[in-house]
Amino acid sequence: MNRHAGTGLIVSILLAVATAAFSAEAPKVRIAYASRSASAMPQYMAVQKGYFKAEGLDVEIIQMNPRLGATAVVNGDVAFATPFTSTFRGVLQGFPMKLTFVHFKKGPYFLLVRPEIKDVQQLRGKRIGVATIKGTDQLVAEEMLQAKGFDITQIQAVSIGDGPVRMQALISGAVDAVCLAPPHDLMLRKMGYPALLGPPVLGLPSAGMLTSDRLIKENPQVVRRTLKAMLRAHQFIADNRQETIQTSIKWLPQPLDIAEHSYDNELKNINRDGTMTDAEIESIIERIGEKKRPLNEVRDFSFAREALKELGRQ
């Protein structure tokens, strides 16, 4: 064996050993998101910028129906679920989970309708396509309609799926209205579908990080390190408009003006510290929970606060 070949073999062996060591040491963390949209950008940005790897985590982000999030977390199929309302409702119903982080305190939803609909009262007897029954988009749509004096019992909610699927349902005429956040709202408007209402006054968080009590108890360092990567992604998104817009286009192919609209209406308002006040959480519980549980049983922002301290931001 010549000297160069021997050197090459040694390098290959060292790389293989390093890779194996990383795989053995880096915890596998799966994060479920609902839709390829701005609300999932923090996870994608953390992957792209290497923030998870910097925390020694092997992270996979996967798309999942919001209705499955709470069950998937409790079963250990995923470590975190990001769809807010459906997963948090599961917590309120007794699932052994907690809200540990909030990406966006209020999603900028808009109610998009077919072109012939000019007034909210024309929605009587019509169908609204929603992601899941009583999910965030439906509750926000109802909030906006009620603010205009509309009787929400006069419109039928139909479970359709994520943003792109709801868009197509409106275009095909399968439904008469949908409630969407950027970038999908502007995509529809450019095709001639008006935004009748929006954004909401109160609204609801569009995404967060909800995890199991078991993970919190058995591997709190994974929770803290994951949220630390999330905080770094949040800060980068808030401080770097142009690069975030370009990353958005990579995440979801879209025209530049739509990506800019998405940033200016949602991403620039990203929650920098990942937490919410007790009063804010109580308000959410009042709006979406059939049951009430003590705050300490439904939220734990201690890991986010620890991560903030490590980053020198608290």
Image (cartoon, rainbow, N blue to C red):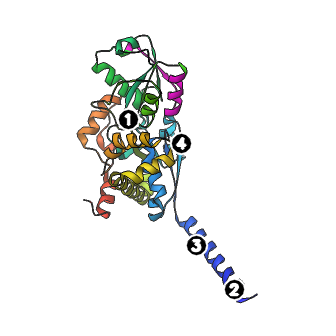
- Provide the residue designation for mark 3: 18
Label 2 SS: helix
The image quadrant that residue 46 belongs to is bottom left
Calculate the distance from the C-alpha at mark 3 to the C-alpha at mark 4: 30 Å
Q: Residue 44: horizontal and vertical position, in percent?
A: 47, 51
- Provide the residue designation for mark 2: 4
Label 1 SS: helix
Q: Quadrant of the C terminus?
A: bottom left
Of the image marks 4 and 1, the number of the one nearer the N terminus: 4
Label 4 SS: strand
- Give the amino acid type for the residue marked by disc 2 in the picture: His
Q: Which numbered mark, 4 or 1, is in the foreground of this view?
A: 4
Of the image marks 2 and 1, the number of the one nearer the N terminus: 2
| Bounds of the magenta segment | 153-171
Label 3 SS: helix
Of the image marks 2 and 3, the number of the one nearer the N terminus: 2
- Give the amino acid type for the residue marked by disc 1 in the picture: Leu
Q: Residue 265: horizontal and vertical position, in percent?
A: 34, 39
- Give the amino acid type for the residue marked by disc 3 in the picture: Ala
Between residues 190 and 150, which one lies in front from this camera angle? 190
Q: Which numbered mark, 1 or 3, is in the foreground of this view?
A: 3
Disc 4 crowd rating (10 Å Cα; few below 14, some 14-19, many 20+) is some
Disc 1 crowd rating (10 Å Cα; few below 14, some 14-19, many 20+) is many
Between residues 295 and 175, which one lies in front from this camera angle? 175
Extreme residue toward the right, this view: 1
Calculate the distance from the C-alpha at mark 4 to the C-alpha at mark 1: 23 Å
